[in-house]
Image: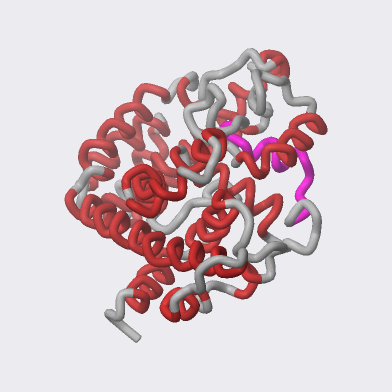
Amino acid sequence: LAHDIGNPPLGHAGEEAIRDWFETSECGLKMQDFMSLEEQADFRNFDGNAQGFRILSRLEMPDHRGGMQLTCATLGAFAKYPGCAESKWKKCGFFRQDAEMFAEVAESCGMIPDGKYSWKRHPLSFLLEAADDIAYLTVDFEDALRLGLIDYGELEKFFLEIIDSANSAGYVKTLSSPLRKAEFLRAQAIGVLVREASKKFVDCHDQLLKGEWTTPLTEVIPQKDVLQQIRKRSTSGIYNHRSVAEVVGAGFEMVSGMLDIFVPCINEIAAENSGGKAATRRSKRIGAMLPQSLWDTPGAWGGKAYCRLIRVLDYISGMTDHYAVSLYQKLKGISL
């Protein structure tokens, strides 16, 4: 349930917008002058996985040390990429500010060190990864049918190949609606894939415990070829469809636009709090729109540029798509 909890508005598009803003906007470039290279790496490689760990272990229920007080085993299994932005992992699993907390999780779980602030994956994270792969490859394909991006015949072909059952092929013919057929086939396909991934997990148990296994479980089950075909078809015809591109483009403008508004205002407030030039009325008014929980943070908006920016991203990353659109329209004076 927590897998995507750290994703900013519009998911991967929001992540890209944050990275792009930090590296190309005037405000983002100025912030870099006041950060170490290690701190900059968190924003150059901003990732919802790292934000998710931060939410679970720090932001949710902030009055309790350890956030939601989840077990170390749960937090370890949650970490698909157990390393900081500068580790060998292709994505950032936790931010520099949360590195010591993750190190505590890793030590408690007996995770195998693999460099500075980097570990071999927790064995159970491979089940998390398989669950994610299975869910998005099947459910996104079903959603594409509902949106008219693929036809039913294409979905039936792929899903029946996964299921490989004459009974299922016969039963689906008795259903009249293509959408009901798709629901049935999707549920059957998920059941098959879950069982096969579970079997592979058991077969590779010893290698997993030793940190020697690195391949996603869905890439070594009998249905791996058809899953690859679905992934390829989804990339070309669904995720890159014009309707999706329009949302991604709007997301860039919205997320970077909110950062361009909030961050300079917070920097002005921080300067005033440190005895510098007084913040403008505009900055104080916009700063008042930020939630009280951010103002109650020890040190408020003073201190390091890194801490100020990560607090603003805590707020933006916690927004739903709908809330983000509504807030951005208010900030821009489009709606009141």
Q: Where is residue 89 drawn, in percent x and y?
A: 53, 26
**In magenta segment, residue 76:** yes
Magenta span:
68-81
**Does the rendering let one see residue 288?**
yes
Name the foreground residue: 270 vs 259.
270
Numbered-mark total: 0
Location of the C terminus by quadrant is: bottom left
Considering only vertical position in the picture, is 306 above or below 255?
A: above
Asked where in the image residue 167 lies, by quadrant, the reply is: top left
Taking the spot 28% from the left edge, 44% from the top edge, the residue there is 239
Q: Where is residue 223 drawn, in percent x and y?
A: 42, 25
Looking at the image, residue 11 sits to the left or right of residue 272; the answer is: left
**Does the rendering let one see residue 171?**
no
View extreme (bottom): residue:
336
Taking the spot 66% from the left edge, 23% from the top edge, the residue there is 116
Taking the spot 54% from the left edge, 28% from the top edge, the residue there is 86
Visual colour scheme: secondary structure
Taking the spot 35% from the left edge, 41% from the top edge, the residue there is 170
Q: Where is residue 171 drawn, in percent x and y?
A: 37, 45
